[in-house]
Amino acid sequence: MSVQTAVRSVATPEQQVALGRLMAEPETSVSDAPLYSPQAAGLALLLALLLVSPSVPEEPKKK
Amino acid sequence: MSTAVAHAAHEISSRAITWLHANRHLGGFPSETTADLGDPDSVYKPLSETVLLSSLVLREGVAGPGEAQHARELLDFAWQQVREGDLLYERQLRHSVLTDPLETYAHFARSGKRHEGLEELLAHSAALGALTEVMPNRRLAVANARRIVGIGDGEDWAELTRVTWLGATPQPWAIDWMTGYCLTHTVFHLTDWGARPEDMPEDLADYVATWLPVWIDIWSEVEQWDLVAELLIVGVCLPEPLFQEADWKRLAGVQHADGLVPRDGAPVDDDPLQRFSDQQHPTIVAAIAGTLALSRLLST
Amino acid sequence: MTTDGRIAQLSIADAAATLAGRILDAFHGDEFTGLADHVDSCADQVVALGAVRLVGADVFAPHLLLSRPLAGRDVAVVADSFAYFPAVGEPDTHERRVTAWRDWATATVLTRLAGTGPDEAVVFAPPPDTASAVLGPADAWQQWSVHVAQLSPLALPEVGGPVVEAVGREGKALARGAVRAVLRRDYVNAARLARWVALLSHSGTRLPLDPVLLVEQIRLHGGTGPRLLLDLAVARHQLGIEPA
């Protein structure tokens, strides 16, 4: 085994902990779900139907 | 029945109605308003939505005596604002292909406030087949309003539904914020705001039942409370209603002590007028959601 | 986390991406150099072995899906990865449970492919735990699907076992999780779930979404990370669609 002769006998504790974390990677902590955007709204907000949406945010908001 | 959901739904709607009632005078027309309505979105649209809420509170009959009285007073306030229908009549007369007088009037008519001249105009307009071109879900709003008022010869609901976003049952991730609202309104009008859940075509009902929890989840995470509350109404309108306790508790949790329900996670303005104009819509939506949910829970 | 810990995590993640790129080459019709040659060519071989352990059963994707021959030296490399990174003891935390299941999948596939049991270090005959202990209840489909994504190397043919069976019974929860990941634009997670969607679809489970369109959506929006692309290549193969 070329590998065994070339390397240390065991990973460092940091490496072992790191591997554990990578095994169970969480989902992204911040969602990038679709929000209001002027492009998507288009003409629909011009006298939109009843209840269709609130008055729009001043700035397209990114989370 | 889920007692926890019923409790949250009742809390949300009664507090929201109280806030809307207390602030109603911030939502009146300027004194010189004519049927042209310089900015229809500023007062007219929210006023119409207030009428919708009041008509649903009175239709469902599950509000406490105080809230029911508030709903009647909100309705009276709005009826007086539109000069007992004359403003809608003048607007329809001048702009014969517009649909908003009909859409607003339907909820007055449902509550017993009728205007004979306007109904004649609306019936004539339906007979002409004259309608400004609107988005497909908005076309369903017109169909539902005509059904409520009792004008026209009926509509081809299947065809009207087929051309909406929902009618195509797209892959469920092919949706954005605005399309989310289109989806909710297709369900609102098809079921006349939860009164006719059985009118949802079966395949659409299955589709919505499968994916609604996902949409509620992703828009709750990014604190889009207005859209989330509309999606909760959709759940109430399904043939097999969807009531997830966590959703209702979350919405109750973001409601302010005075009853306001914020549009989203952004800070709420302190200025009373700005605050009302920004947050009136989500508060109305939440009031409708709570009212319809409580009613559906009590009837099942 | 300490700086050393962060560096270790980044270097193993980088090495895993490189390894995934090698495996991906096999799906694109290129020569698959083999694990042993790959590890030999890496500057830090412990890190490279960590990557082998992390990529886990997916190192055998070319053998399982493309019938590439398995060399004895490659078997030894996997055994080395267990020697240098000792298997977790009692699976008493979620992270350890996930690790134990992934290791189990690696050992299971290796045993199948190598014919006989691999090195002594890699004998995990019984599943480490119940499926519900690692996945949680499917009613809580958001968290359940994140756990399913963490176990994506199990979404290979020939792995089987309790987790695969449990996921196979929850097509709707899985589909919801995948759509949620796409809508959150978490494409790494979405691709991991798409593999499960493809596995279920391949086994004839009815799903409320179109698996081919899901994979294509992620391919067009998900960027070029080699591990994501490897997940998609596995999914595409299961769905019977040509490599992109």
Image: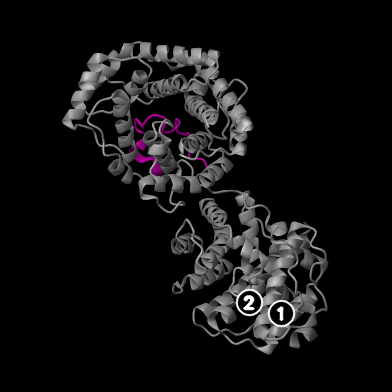
Q: Which residue is mark 2?
A: C59
Q: Circle 2: is it few (<14), some (14-19), or many (20+) Cα within 10 Å?
A: many
| Along the line of sight, the residue nearer the viewer: B275 or B8 | B8
| Along the line of sight, the residue nearer the viewer: B111 or B257 | B111
Q: Residue at x 45, y 33 (%)?
A: A56
Q: Is residue C48 left or right of residue B278?
A: right
Q: Position of residue C15 (x, y in %)?
A: 66, 72
Q: Is residue A43 magenta?
A: yes
Residue A46 in view here: yes
- Secondary element under disc 1, as helix, strand or loop, is helix
Which chain does tag 1 point to?
C
Q: Is residue A20 above or below residue B183?
A: below
Which chain does tag 2 point to?
C
Q: Position of residue B68 (x, y in %)?
A: 50, 15
Quarter containing the N terminus of chain B: top right
Residue C41 in view here: no
Q: Is residue B270 left or right of residue C109?
A: left
Secondary structure character of the magenta stretch overall: loop
Identity, as a three-letter code, of the amino acid under mark 2? Val
